[in-house]
Image (spheres, grey):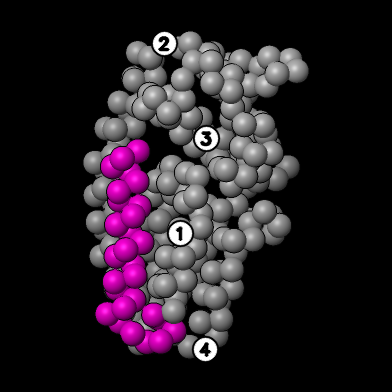
Amino acid sequence: MDFQGALSIRSSAEAIVAWIQEMILRGELKPGDRLPNEPELARMFGVSRGALREALAVLKAKGIIERRPGKGTYIRRINRAELLGSLATRKRDEDLFLDLLEVRELVESKVVELAIQRATAKDLEKIETALRLLPSTSSNNTSPLEADLEFHLSLALAAHNEILFRLARTVNELLQDVRERTLLQPGRLAECQREHEAIFAAIRARDLPRALAALKTHLDQVRREVITG
């Protein structure tokens, strides 16, 4: 059994469930609203059909959606108190996520500085290869979450500091839930790709001020999305 694939599907499904619940609480989805069809939803969230179907099954089991034969999938009238309880739990985690993002900015700023000083031509090739994963996840059997992580870890490797690499890997792994919540938002994948390209271009040019500014733009966007949920 492909346990890594199964975990990827499960984590993506959980992120979709949480995102749809939050859209309902914000009033972006209302009782009676019809959801897009499965292929369109999968494209919107940047996930596989398997992950989407698992998410829809969970939402149906929770009584949040209903399938109407021949008509589609609709939002049901639901217990807002239960959804608010779920959201409150996530908000309690928000402060920890923001603390982690501060640590990530410290670690990755040093990563960028050292990568500019130490990255070899081979390192730059590896970063560029990782950079190309995100826009092609639909055809290369890599999830957007894995592609994003691969880019950041390729930067850390280019710093040529084993302890710093381990710190960067640990912080990024701890932020996996943040990655799921933000990357699956409609339109976010394209924005993230542009931010990654700006970081890489500055590193390749050995331009530290530009690289740090691009990294800050990227992490500030993640921070805003965590706060606005």
Task: Give the label, 4 or 3, closer to the camera.
Answer: 3
| 152 in relation to 55, above or below | below
Mark number for residue 16? 3
Mark 3 to mark 1 CA distance (whole Å): 18 Å
Quarter containing the N terminus: top right
**Amino acid type indicated by mark 4:** Ala
Q: Amino acid at mark 1?
A: Cys
> For the residue labelled by badge 2, is the local secondary structure a helix, a strand or a loop?
loop
Task: Find disc 4 in the rendering and name its residue.
Answer: 121
What's the magenta bit mostly, secondary-structure-wise?
A: helix
Q: Does the magenta-highlighted stretch encompass residue 140? A: no
Q: CA distance from mark 4 to mark 3?
A: 39 Å
Real-space Cα separation, disc 4 to disc 1, in angstroms? 24 Å
**Mark in the foreground, 4 or 1:** 1
Asked whether the residues under the numbered discs 4 and 3 touch, taking CB atoms below 8 Å apart as contact, a structural biologist would say: no
Residue 193, given in percent of the width and then of the height, sits at: 49, 63
Q: Amino acid at mark 3?
A: Ile
Mark 4 and mark 1 in contact? Answer it, CB < 8 Å.
Answer: no
Instruction: Tell me the number on the disc at residue 79.
Output: 2
What label does residue 192 carry, if any?
Answer: 1
Give the distance between the C-alpha atoms of the residues marked 2 and 1, in whole angstroms.
Answer: 34 Å
Determine the residue positioned at 52% across, 75% down: 127
- Helix, strand or loop at mark 4: helix
Which mark's residue is nearer the viewer, 4 or 2? 2
| Separation (CA) of disc 3 from disc 2 | 19 Å
Verify CB contact (< 8 Å) between mark 2 and mark 1.
no
Q: Percent position (x, y) of residue 46?
A: 58, 47
User: Which residues are the magenta region?
Assistant: 202-229
Whole-angstrom CA distance, mark 4 to mark 2, is 56 Å
Dot 4 or dot 3: first in sequence order is 3
Q: Which residue shows up at 43% across the image and 46% down it?
A: 182
On screen, residue 166 above or below 179: below
